[in-house]
Image (cartoon, grey):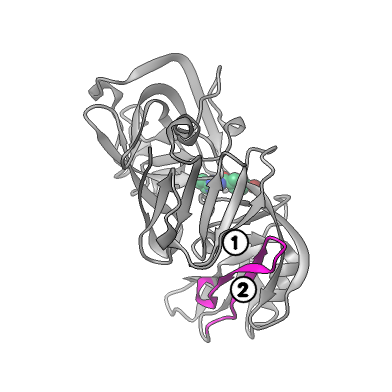
Amino acid sequence: STGGAVATPEDHDVEYLTPVSIGTPEQILNLDIDTGSSDLWVFSSETSRSEVKGQTLYDPSNSSTAQKLEGYTWSISYGDGSSSAGEVYLDTVSIGALTVSSQAVEVAQKVSSEFTSDSNNDGLLGLGFGSLNTVQPNAQKTFFDNAMPALDSPVFTADLKAGIPGRYNFGYIDPNAYTGNITYVSVDDSQGFWDWTSPGYAIGSGSFENTTIKGIADTGTSLLLLPSSVVSAYYGKISGAKYDSTQAGYVLPCSPTPPDFAFGVGDDGAAIVLPGKYINYAPTGSSGTTCFGGIQGDSGIGFAIFGDVALKAAFVVFDGGSKTLGWASK
Ligand SMILES: O=C(NNC1=NCCC1)c1ccc(Br)cc1
């Protein structure tokens, strides 16, 4: 089997939303597919009314295939401080033509303000490793783990794009979605993340800097978070760029276009190049002269995060069979 669906960017590519069918008859919710977590949770008929502002709600009582897991609960908090919690049902879940008949659907009873104010986001679909799932008393499998045995190939791919819809596919690699070769790198799943090591980076037309950068491929994080030495080297090349403590990040003049940023993949010299315009993440004020940087520091996290700013420059294969990541330009 195979499947897949469109991934549509919200403003500034802060997140990408994908239509997911739940229940019988189908209830279609737009979910944030997140390789940095492993819970599938949705806004629901059980979500506190004061915490819902425009989201589409999954109502298990309107699904003939919903089955409540009595006594099961979940509670999650994300790297950006957002959180949600609730109860658990099993129901049929599909992404395009790919269907999992007994998927744990975690219904939110409470969500934090970040989710309440994100009116187009109806929930998250985690594609991290199973060890991250928060359901008690028994952890539940991700959509990918449930689907994997039936997939033509045990993979899913992320093809996110800047400002236009991309795609998540399951079970196959679309040869028309990328250019050149796919370079595969090993993944350390011991922390539950798609954790890999880049051999270094280059700034603009500069020479490649060999420096080990361990980090996770996280579709649920918006920015590219890198070691402070790398971030300082990058913004040090840009006149007027500075760390703005008020914004808690580096800001830069939106014009001229900043230098490209490339990160290495594999040990054969392959690299993914972020066009400089990707680093103009969003204007900080109404004049549009100053931009918030799409590359920021990873201090305090313990490893880098290759979030959407990086992923949208690549075609990425998440291989659940070999536990590897494949990176290609496009
Ligand atoms: O939470 C994380 N990724 N997903 C999402 N963020 C916000 C909503 C969804 C995340 C995961 C690992 C690390 Br390290 C930092 C952050």
Taking the spot 56% from the left edge, 59% from the top edge, the residue there is: 182
- Give left or right: position of 42 versus 229: left
Return the disc, 1 or 2, that comes first in the chain's sequence. Answer: 1
Tell whether 80 sits left or right of 72: right
Residue for point 43% across, 66% down: 162
Judging by the rendered image, the residue that carries numbered circle 2 is 261
Q: Residue at x 36, y 35 (%)?
A: 43
Q: Residues within 10 Å of mark 2 (few under 14, many from 20)?
A: many
Q: Is residue 76 visible?
A: yes
CA distance for labels 1 and 2: 11 Å
Tag 1 and tag 2, C-beta contact below 8 Å: yes
The residue carrying mark 1 is 224
Left or right: where 30 falls relative to 316: left
Q: Is residue 267 magenta?
A: yes
Q: What type is the residue that disc 1 sits on?
A: Leu
Residue 113: x and y in percent read: 45, 44
Quadrant location of the N terminus in the rendered image: top left
Counting other residues with Cα less than 10 Å from the Cα at mark 1, is it few (<14), some (14-19), or many (20 or more)?
many
Using the rendered image of the protein, determine whether residue 246 is visible from the camera's viewpoint.
no
